Amino acid sequence: MANGSRQAAWEFFGAELKRRRENAALTQAELGVRVFVSGGYIGQFEQAIRKPQLDVAQRIDMVLQTDGFFERLWKKLIKEQPYAAYFAHVVELERLATEIHEYAPTVVPGLLQIPEYARAVFLASNPLAADEYIEDLVRARMDRTRLLKDATRPMYWLVLHETTLRMSVGGPAVMAQQLEHIAALMRQRHVMVQVLPFTAGAHPHMGKLMWLLGFDDAPPTVYTEGVSSGNLLDEPAVVKRVRASYDHIRAAALSPEASLALIESAAEGYRRCAIS
């Protein structure tokens, strides 16, 4: 399903939600209370600005007595996304975020990946997959990277563990290109990147990818990821704890200037290795 068609389908989801809510004589706030989200969220669902998570769609069906309609429509739309089901909602939120703070412990984040690096990552996870499948995944990932090229791009602040610089994904030539790409984005001031060095030792969220997404008109959200699973959390107390952990990691990281120098040095080392 093309992006325009998918958006039209989500607009249909929202229009149906509004129609059936009004038929049940419920305000947005009243429905929100019953499905454990704010009335503002219900309004954003109805306008197709935000997409509900599956459990919210299921609760909407229960409250409005729609016999699984919204759950089935949600699954249909998510199934046709070019992303894993647990990550598709994050991609939608990513497009709405005004700021993104991320900690990457082992792999360069998708928003900064070049095609060659992304291809190596996907092949490592899908060693027996057909080339066409891998290329579909790479195209979807490259579509995401356009977010940081838009004039309205979010403020993106990333902390990379030094492991991401030293782990040769795709070989020395690919790593040189990947790190040079990150350095170029930093020099263009499209992103803020810090490196957490090995010398920093133990730190919060060791080995765990962590995102914090901020919005102009909605509460901040946290995303953490495990093996073939992800958790999207917006409980204020949880977001506050994760934000504190991120701040500790950022405080222990090198300055942006020192990080850029380290990234460029690592890229040069890979470049020399690729040539020799």
Image (cartoon, helix red, strand yellow):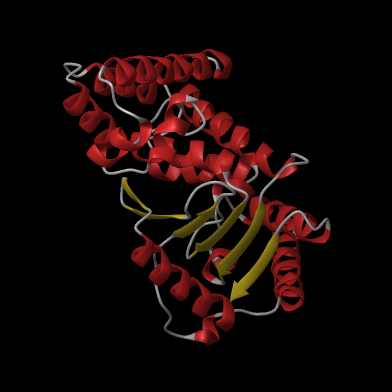
Residue 14: x, y in percent?
Answer: 42, 21
Which quarter of the picture shows residue 242? Answer: bottom left
- From the viewer's side, name the closer residue of 197 and 220: 220
- Taking 12 as reference, is 83 above or below it? below
265 lies left or right of 77: right
195 lies left or right of 50: right
Identify the residue at image location x=61%, y=32%: 143
Residue 225: x, y in percent?
Answer: 37, 54
Which quarter of the picture shows residue 56? Answer: top left
Residue 208 in view (yes/no): yes
41 lies left or right of 118: left
- Taking 46 as reference, is 141 above or below it? below
- From the viewer's side, name the closer residue of 200 and 99: 99
Q: Most extreme residue toward the right, as rendered?
A: 188
196 lies left or right of 11: right
Residue 162: x, y in percent?
Answer: 56, 72
Identify the residue at image location x=50%, y=36%: 92
- From the viewer's side, name the closer residue of 166 and 186: 186
Query: What is the quadrant of the C terminus in the image?
Result: bottom right
Residue 51 in view (yes/no): no
Which quarter of the picture shows residue 80? Answer: top left
The number of numbered discs placed on residues in the rendered structure image is: 0
Residue 140: x, y in percent?
Answer: 54, 31
Identify the residue at image location x=47%, y=69%: 243
